[in-house]
Image: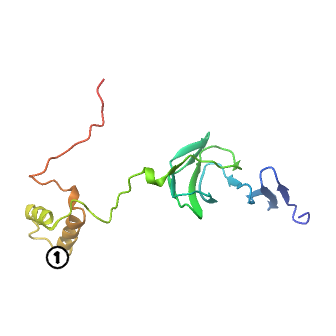
Amino acid sequence: MINYLAKIDYGTFTLQIIVNNEIVTLPMRNKIKTSIQVPPRSEIIQAISLHLKEDSIICNQEIIKGVFLANAIIPAKGIAHIKILHTCEHSIILSELEPEIHPLKEYHILDYTKNPHASKKRFQEIMAKLNLDGMDENAKTTIINICRKYQDIFHLDNERLTTKTFINKK
């Protein structure tokens, strides 16, 4: 290590080496702690090992000032990949990462592979409203496929049209 001018910092579990006259700090891992080096103004994806009893979720959160975690689904066993966003001007080392974690079973999971509003009758009603005359076959096929796949977004006369209020009056 002396030949390479390297230094181990056991307080932060990092290895410092000199490359092209610049000090480069690299995180090290051991069985007790995980040390994550986060460069300034960066976004990284870090693999961490969490020993959980069930599949869980990390909800987006600010873990320290200027350092944020993105939403992530974490398997009960194995490695979790979490996204870390660092907005400050200085490099940091996360030596003990303890994000707020919630069980996945507390959340409703949507299955986007199945469209609950899809039906042959509904698709036929949508197609009856469209005038595809004069279109080339390629464009017509594309529109038909879009209507079939996303038929739940089209409003039909016999359905109630709902809205969301985004502005609250005082």
- The answer to whether residue 116 of the structure is visible from this angle is yes
Please state if 158 lies on the left or on the right of 99 as rendered.
Answer: left
Residue 142 percent across, percent down from the top left: 22, 70
Give the colouring mode of the picture. rainbow
Q: How many marks?
A: 1
Front residue (pair 168, 109): 109
For residue 112, above or below residue 99: below
Residue found 11% across the figure and 66% down from its top = 124
Q: Is residue 111 left or right of residue 42?
A: left
Q: Judge from the rendering whether residue 112 lies leftward or rightward of residue 2; answer left or right.
A: left
For the C terminus, the quadrant is top left
The answer to which of 45 and 25 lies nearer the viewer is 45
Q: Is residue 23 visible?
A: no
Q: Residues within 10 Å of mark 1 (few under 14, many from 20)?
A: few
Mark 1, residue position: 137
Name the residue: 81% across, 60% down.
17
Which residue corresponds to the image point at 50% horizontal and 52% vertical from the top-left?
A: 103
- Looking at the image, which residue sits at the far bottom? 137
Residue at disc 1, secondary structure = helix
Q: In the rendering, at what x and y percent does residue 162 appear?
A: 20, 44
User: What is the quadrant of the N terminus in the image?
Assistant: bottom right
Is 7 rendered above or below residue 170? below
